[in-house]
Amino acid sequence: MTLAEGVQLVAFGILTAMTLGGALGVVLLDNIVYSAFLLGGVFTSMAGLYILLNAGFVAAAQVLVYVGAVNVLILFGIMLVNKEQEFTPIKQAWVGKVATGGVCVGLFALLTASVLNTPWAISAEVPTGEMATVVIGIHFFTDYLLPFELASVLLLIALIGAIVLARREFIPDVAPGEPASEALQLPERPRELVSSVPGSEPGR
Amino acid sequence: MQLEYFLLTAAALFCIGVYGLVSSRNVIRVLMSIELMLNAVNLNLMAFSNYLDPVGINGQVFAVFVISIAAAEAAVGLAIVLSIYRNRDTVDMEQFNLLKW
């Protein structure tokens, strides 16, 4: 990264403010659609932070996968599950919120103390920078080959699993006036048996 | 630029994610909080990769793995949410007590 120090600092400040503000909005806003769009902003500013850290390839992957896939998937989920319901209030719900907030602030204090007190072994070497994509590719096909292949198998498993989980069960449509037979109510029964039930038209 | 700035940002993001994960009642918002936490971890990995291992950049490789796993997690999580919503007709976390004794 050839930017001046001041430019980097200002960019870091702006991106951090966008990230943390967006994250607070995601968690605290009432309207979940606003939360989903703010989540896209958080992901985009995280990509900016990655570029500040000399990681152009991961920044591009972040924009493609998170903003383009995960965020759109969440928006589709909101559309499919869009239910305007008032949650039934729980007694003493504020106790849980205050306790959670206390735990989170304590965790942040703990992390801050440990980050500031650890003597980090900062390396003085010049960062890889533009060659990062090549280096990542070499890593993928040499010492991280097995995790790489396992990740592809896992993505295939997740793809099939998500389809199997989310698809609707096959519900045969029964003509009005015709009594629903017992066979039509078993969703696991194959289609051939359903169509061969007397009274129902074949090929339906 | 300092390593500590990025680590503190990631810590704050992670704590926000934990708060959202525990205190939200909408299932979709819980999934979004999980994504926030994964992003905080990614930022940590990238900061360490840039400041402690700038030539090997193993942290960036790890971050790419985390991104791919997060995509799979979001897909399966939303499928589970859809399936539960179809059965229970609600998105309230407090009413999902299927696995509670």
Image (spheres, rainbow, N blue to C red):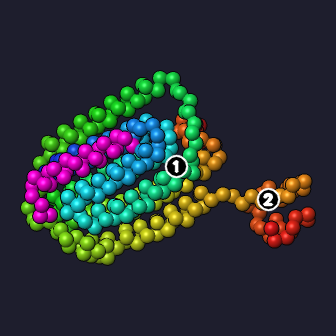
Provide residue B4's location: percent of width, then percent of height.
16, 48
Where is mark 1, residue-wise? Answer: A78
- Name the residue at 59% across, 57% down: A165
Which of these two is toward me, A78 or B58?
A: A78
In primary-sequence order, the first of circles 2 and 1 is: 1
Task: Give the SS element for disc 2.
Answer: loop
Provide residue A191's location: percent of width, then percent of height.
77, 67
Provide residue A188's location: percent of width, then percent of height.
73, 61
Image quarter in which the N terminus of chain A is found: bottom left
Q: Is residue B12 left or right of residue A175?
A: left
Q: Quick one: label 1, few (<14), some, or many (20+) residues within 10 Å?
A: some
Q: Is residue A169 left or right of residue A45?
A: right
- Name the residue at 34% across, 51% down: A41
Magenta residues span: A1-26
Quarter of the view holding residue A27: top left
Where is mark 2, residue-wise? Answer: A173
Residue at the top extreme of this rendering: A92
